[in-house]
Image (tube, grey):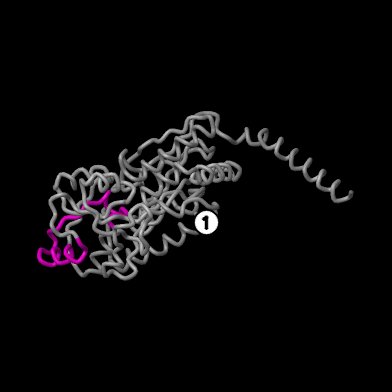
Amino acid sequence: MMMKRRSLIQSAGAAAATLGAPRLFAQEWPSGPVRIIVGFPPGGGTDALARVVATKLSTMWKQSVIVENKAGVSGVLAAEYVAQQPSDGSTLLMAHINSHALAPSLQPKLRYDVQRDFVPIVMVGVTPNLLIAGPGQKALTVKEIVALCKADPGKVSFGSAGPGSAQHLALEMFKLQAGVDALHVPYKGSAPALADLMGNQIQYCFETMTAATPHVKSGKVAAVAQTRTKRAKGHPGVPTMQEQGFQGFEATTWYGLAGPGKLPSGVADKINRDVNTVLAMPDVQERLDTYGAEDGGGTRDKFKDFIATEIAKWGKVVKEGNVKVES
């Protein structure tokens, strides 16, 4: 009888807490539209994943969730912008490896501090990059591309989404491990780089799997290799760089939601829970698998610790490769 009474008391307490939560939460939650800021033009991987999440959150919250593109400096301009916005949940950033792991090492004059100026909310996904070839290329294995680079040093062209981008750093890692020189051609985002690749203006790209996949599936570009040590579910037939002789080669692109530095814990926790719900939806999971985006979801601390690990990893690569970008 005592056990039953205790259970009833606990249930009543939980119900009271639940009923009280909306009243407390209403003071913190934004009343207008929520914006997810993307640091790249429409058509790239970051934009594609942000729109998948935004569409589902709009329905779930019965509130407009708008994706807004603020391209420039490989995603850094968008991060600078969000760091200066009110910490009320109305403006979020689709945080990216460029702005949150590469920029701290590559850009000494960075106008934000990743740990101080942002609250990591939730990982959305980690994708391999795909080494892809334009339609006119005959070298279609990593070994053949290495031979091509050695035969014509500094002339074989590789596009990227910008100086200091994940695609640029993947190329630098390739050059170091292969012992070759190649021509880096930076663009303002994945979409223009892919357009020039398909038009044979450049020869190759280490491109995000998210952005490259539709063009690989349509046959407009050829997939040569993927850059995680395991094959992604969405591209089981594409060998990894490691399988083609580059031991331990792992250069990913990752995405996650973050808010300005003073975002209240209650708001961050709600967004974390709801995005975890979105990522578990079968139709969303199917889209993520197609893009090669894996390992999303989890706690806020998981994302925070992941970012810290990535900052340390890429800081070492930048130093050892003596990689520099113009401010």
- Is 305 magenta? The answer is no
**Is residue 124 found left or right of 222 in the rendered image?**
right
Residue that appears at 25% across and 64% down: 174
- Which span is picked out in magenta? 141-169
Residue 203: x, y in percent?
Answer: 16, 53
Residue 37: x, y in percent?
Answer: 41, 39
Residue 241: x, y in percent?
Answer: 29, 64
Q: Is residue 153 above or below residue 204?
A: below
**Is residue 243 found left or right of 181 in the rendered image?**
right
Of residues 64 and 164, which is closer to you in this image?
64
Q: Is residue 158 above or below residue 22?
A: below
Tag count in the figure? Answer: 1
What residue sits right under mark 1 in the picture?
Answer: 302
Of residues 13 and 36, which is closer to you in this image?
13
Of residues 143 and 38, which is closer to you in this image?
143
| Element at label 1 | helix
At label 1, the amino acid type is Lys
Q: Quadrant of residue 248?
A: bottom left
- Is 154 magenta? The answer is yes
**Is residue 196 found left or right of 209 in the rendered image?**
left
Of residues 267 and 15, which is closer to you in this image?
15
Residue 265: x, y in percent?
Answer: 59, 45
